[in-house]
Amino acid sequence: MSAETTSTGTGSTGEVQLENEHFRVTRWTIAPGGHIPMHRHEHEYVVVPMVTDTMHVTNGDGTEIVAELTAGVSYTRAAGSEHRVENRGGTADVVFVEVEKLA
């Protein structure tokens, strides 16, 4: 299964690579200056960076995090996370794979 989601005018694209009763796997690409709009994660998830780069994350409460990504070094976040993700000032695409635990 492959379904592409492009947020109009945001410079981000998400491609669902796999979805079943247990997992949803989405490959995200954020162009330089682009972002993924504010959203809330309903499920626990793992992020696998495909590049070594920097993302800026604005949390739902307005706090900001500078996330230093290292290609192949995964991290996880809890269900309920709410944020906007940006590729500020980068010169290359930020690419990562997100694996959501559905059940």
Image (spheres, helix red, strand yellow):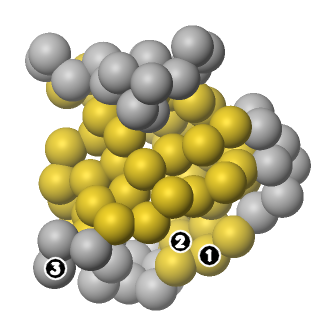
Q: Secondary structure at mark 1?
A: strand
Residue 53 in percent (x, y) is at 68, 37
54 relative to 88, above or below: below
Query: For this rendering, which residue is in front, 103 or 48?
Result: 48
In the picture, residue 102 is in which quadrant? bottom left
Residue 93 seen in this snapshot:
yes
Query: For this rendering, which residue is in front, 8 or 58?
Result: 58
Of the numbered discs 3 and 1, the one sitting upstream in the chain is 3
Q: Which residue is mark 1?
A: 76
Q: Which residue is mark 3?
A: 61
Q: Is residue 52 left or right of residue 63?
A: right
Of the numbered discs 2 and 3, the one sitting upstream in the chain is 2
Residue 70 in percent (x, y) is at 80, 49
The numbered dot on residue 19 is none
Q: Residue furthest front?
A: 89
Tell me whether the residue at label 1 lies in contact with that at label 2, contact meaning CB atoms closer than 8 angstroms: yes
Residue at 44 percent of width and 18 percent of height: 31
Q: Is residue 9 left or right of residue 89?
A: left
95 relative to 6, above or below: below
Cα separation, mark 1 vs mark 2, equals: 6 Å
Which amino acid, mark 3? Asp
Which amino acid, mark 2? Tyr
Look at discs 3 and 1 and give the one toward the viewer. 3
